Amino acid sequence: MARVFSTKLKFVVALSLAGAATTAVADITIGVTLSATGPAASLGIPEKNTVAIMPTSMGGEKVKYVVLDDATDPTAASKNARKLVSEDKVDVIIGSSTTPTSTAVLEVAAETKTPQIALAPFAPAADKAAWVFQAPQNFGIMAGAVVGHMVANGVKSVAFIGYSDGYGELWLRELTRLAAAKDIKLVATERFNRTDTSVTGQILKILSANPDAVLVVGSGTPAALPQATLAERGYKGRIYQTHGVANNDFLRVGGKSVEGAVLPIGPVLVPNQLPDSNASKNAALEYVKAYEAAYGVGSHSTFGAHTWDAGLLLQRAIPVALKKARPGTVEFRVALRDALENVKDLAATHGVFNFSPSDHNGLDGRSVVMVRVENGAWKLLH
């Protein structure tokens, strides 16, 4: 009798362990690599903060987040992505914060067939593009808004000073194309590094070209340096920045020297200034409420909102993927990629997403508004 009881007990224990294993496999694991330190920390910190307030379940399954810091270093971002896939067995990767680090993550994501939702815009290689979706607006949308403002305000010549990396080069490509189409002459092209402490030489060359406007292409606090130098040298023309500076740290570091800067941004930066007809207003207000409840009034930024939008995309796609496969498998990662490709009419904080197999950017003109820095704050331009 004791032997029978022992056999039954072993069977029950085995079933319990099997059930526990099944439950563990069912958990969804989301890997996140962000630039929480380094030159892009003002982007990565609000992104990391946002992960902490994202849902702990999706599609009826528990969600586990594994968050790593890549220190704004593409090599570290690649290592993080490798660890997330090989050791943490993630189902999807969110990140990274910059164009170079996001590009590095894609190399691993594509190789391992792991969906990636990038938090920075970039141009993926054609043979890897199937595995990456981009939460931010693409360069064409943002550059188009900038050039449109130039045309409306009589700008006939423009100078460029931008990062000497993928972010700067892709912006330069779009500016060159769009400005030429509108008969705006590009009279100077200068570059700088994220870690530079002086751009005086570049600014002197720009001033000698006497442009009607200057476009500064950078992200986070380093982008304040060229505008501050222009102000020190008495430049009186229009100064444009990109959406890469849309956080309060840029305003704090730039101070009075960045007053008057005009830039394209996602609706989430100024939700209370949006008309009720704006498709993103409700989603933006919901995010701002959640973020500021956790981190304080006025603390939200567009970069954290990209992370929130990544979460909204997954909340839409994961229930669909779960109908085809279980988390922790190659089949689930493929199903999740396919489900993301079919997200339609998702009103998020930065715009309305409509993905397809041929479009992994998904945003249109509704994802951009123009603002100006006025009295140390963002002012919506109508």
Image (spheres, helix red, strand yellow):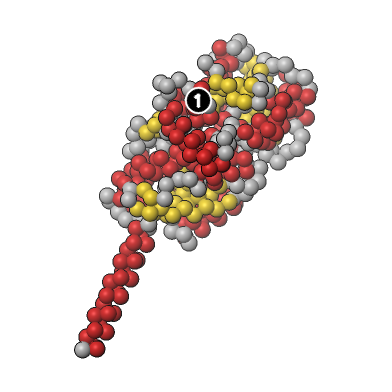
Front one among 305 and 289: 289
Relative to 11, is 26 above or below? above
> What type is the residue that disc 1 sits on?
Asn
Residue 183 shows in this picture: no
Front one among 105 and 301: 301
**Position of residue 205 in the picture relative to residue 66 (left or right):** right
Front one among 306 and 189: 306
Question: Which residue lies at the image location 37% right of the left edge and 57% below the top edge?
Answer: 27
Residue 188 shows in this picture: yes
Q: Which residue is mark 1?
A: 272
Quadrant position of the N terminus in the picture = bottom left
What is the x, y in percent for residue 285? 46, 31
Question: Which residue lies at the image location 35% right of the left edge and 41% below the top edge?
Answer: 316
Circle 1 Cα neighbour tier, 10 Å, few/some/many (<14 / 14–19 / ≥20): some
What is the x, y in percent for residue 57? 38, 50
Choose top left, top right, bottom left or bottom right for residue 179: top right
Relative to 52, is 209 above or below? above
What is the x, y in percent for residue 267? 49, 27
- Tell which residue pokes out farthest to the top in this image: 154
What is the x, y in percent for residue 247? 60, 33
Choose top left, top right, bottom left or bottom right for residue 351: top left
Question: Which residue lies at the image location 34% right of the left edge and 34% below the top edge?
Answer: 344
Classify mark 1: helix, strand or loop: helix
Give the total of numbered labels: 1
Question: Which residue lies at the image location 48% right of the left edge and 39% below the top edge?
Answer: 290
